[in-house]
C-alpha cells in the first residue's frame, strides 16, 4: 500500500492549519492581554490599599492633633487672661468667650461652604466648566 500525497488534500489541510495558527496566536495574545490587565489591577489595588491605609491614619490623626491644638490654645488664652486679670473666674469666662467666638466663626464658614457646595450650584459650575472646554 502506498500512500500518495494529493496536492488538493494538502492545500485543504494548509488552509485549515493557517486559521488555527492565527486563532492560537490570537488566543495567546488575548491571554497575555488579560494577564497584563490582571497584573495592573493587582498593582492598582495594592496602591489603593496603601493609600486607604494612610488616609485612615490621617483621618484619625488630624482630628486628634486639631483637638489638642484647640485645647492648648484655649489653655494659653486662659493663662494669658489670668496674667492680666488676676482672677480665675474672669479668665475662664474670657476663654469660654474666645471659644464661643471661634465656634461661631467656624459655623459661619460651614454654612457658607454648604451653600457653595449644594448640588444646583455644583451642577451649574460643572456645566460652566464643560462649556468653557468646548
Image: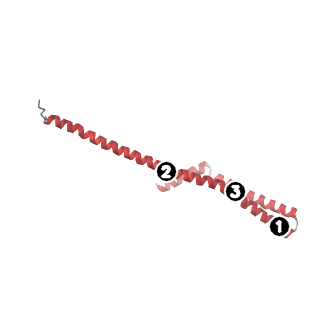
Rendered position, 93 above or below 10: below
Number of numbered discs on residues: 3
Residue at x 34%, y 45% (from the top left corner): 29
Residue designated by label 2 = 44
- Please provide percent x and percent y for residue 99: 77, 59
- Please provide percent x and percent y for residue 1: 11, 29
Judging depth in this view, the residue of 14 and 111 nearest the camera is 14
Marks 1,3: beta carbons within 8 A: no
- Mark 3 surroundings: few (<14), some (14-19) or many (≥20) residues within 10 A: few
- Please provide percent x and percent y for residue 72: 75, 62
Which numbered disc, 3 or 2, marks the residue that appears first in the sequence?
A: 2
Residue designated by label 1 = 81
Residue at x 41%, y 48% (from the top left corner): 36
Q: Residue farthest to the top?
A: 1
Disc 1 or disc 3, which is closer to the eye? 3
- Left of 12 or right of it: where is 22? right
The alpha-carbon separation of the residues under discs 3 and 2 comes to: 30 Å
Residue at x 28%, y 42% (from the top left corner): 22
Judging depth in this view, the residue of 37 and 113 nearest the camera is 37
Image quarter of residue 75: bottom right
- Please provide percent x and percent y for residue 57: 62, 54
Residue designated by label 3 = 64
Circle 2 SS class: helix
Circle 3 SS class: helix
Rendered position, 82 above or below 52: below
Circle 1 SS class: helix
Image quarter of residue 90: bottom right
- Left of 86 or right of it: where is 122? left
Amino acid at each position: 500500500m502506498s500512500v500518495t500525497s494529493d496536492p488538493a488534500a494538502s492545500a485543504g489541510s494548509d488552509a485549515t492549519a493557517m486559521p488555527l495558527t492565527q486563532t492560537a496566536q490570537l488566543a495567546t495574545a488575548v491571554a497575555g492581554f488579560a494577564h497584563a490587565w490582571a497584573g495592573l489591577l493587582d498593582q492598582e489595588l495594592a496602591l489603593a490599599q496603601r493609600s486607604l491605609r494612610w488616609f485612615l491614619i490621617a483621618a484619625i490623626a488630624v482630628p486628634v492633633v486639631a483637638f489638642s491644638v484647640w485645647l492648648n490654645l484655649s489653655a494659653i488664652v486662659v493663662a494669658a487672661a489670668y496674667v492680666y486679670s488676676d482672677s480665675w473666674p474672669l479668665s475662664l469666662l474670657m476663654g469660654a468667650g474666645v471659644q464661643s467666638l471661634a465656634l461661631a466663626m467656624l459655623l459661619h464658614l460651614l454654612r457658607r461652604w454648604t451653600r457653595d457646595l449644594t448640588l444646583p450650584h455644583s451642577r451649574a459650575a460643572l456645566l460652566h466648566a464643560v462649556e468653557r472646554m468646548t
